[in-house]
Amino acid sequence: MSKLHIKKGDTVYVNTGKDRGKTAKVLQVLVKENRAIVEGINLVSKSTKPSAANPQGGIVKQEASIHISNLNVVDPKSGKPTRIGRKEDSEGSLVRYSKKSGEEIK
């Protein structure tokens, strides 16, 4: 299985869908499904029963997953969406870098 270009904590740009053009932070990456849950993106309404955490119950908005092909990592230098490359650093470990600016992505 190939490595994904997105990790938890990355700031990403949404390419397609109802939230196109928004940038947000990745909360979770679902590797087997090639999907990610992004903060405030792809919100769906979900009915909940009353519980200790939510005694009223009712309809709750929450994030649904979005396919990672619809996301681009944001370049740390320019703030624009960019593609990702991998190269070895001085210690010999692989690091991700922005193809636009060449800047390393932490």
Image (spheres, helix red, strand yellow):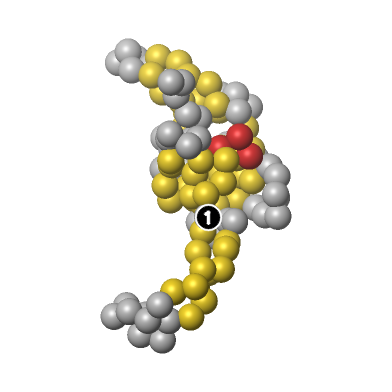
Q: Could you say where residue 88 lies in the image, as x and y percent from the top left?
A: 40, 14
Tell me if 82 is positioned left or right of 97 in this view. right
The image quarter in which residue 3 lies: top left
Closer to us: 106 or 67? 67
37 left or right, relative to 83: left
Q: What residue is at 52 percent from the left and 55 percent from the top?
A: 64
Q: Position of residue 84 (x, y in %)?
A: 55, 26
Quadrant of the image containing the C terminus = top left
> Which one is nearer the viewer's eye here, 4 or 104?
4
Q: Which residue is mark 1?
A: 64
Identify the residue shown where x is 29% and y is 80%. 52
Identify the amino acid type marked 1: Ala
Crowd band around label 1 with a 10 angstrom C-alpha radius: few (<14), some (14–19), many (20+)? some
> Which residue does the image show at 57% across and 61% down from the upper left?
43
Can you say whether 102 is above or below 52 in the image? Answer: above
Q: Element type at marker 1?
A: loop
Residue 76, percent from left and from top = 54, 39
User: Total marks drawn?
Assistant: 1
Residue 51, compared with residue 97, is above or below; it is below
Residue found 57% across the figure and 63% down from its top: 44
* Camera sees residue 77: no
Q: Position of residue 71 (x, y in %)?
A: 60, 40
Q: Residue furthest bottom?
A: 56
**Residue 86 in view here:** yes
**Quadrant position of the N terminus in the picture:** top left
Residue 55 in the figure: left or right of residue 71 = left
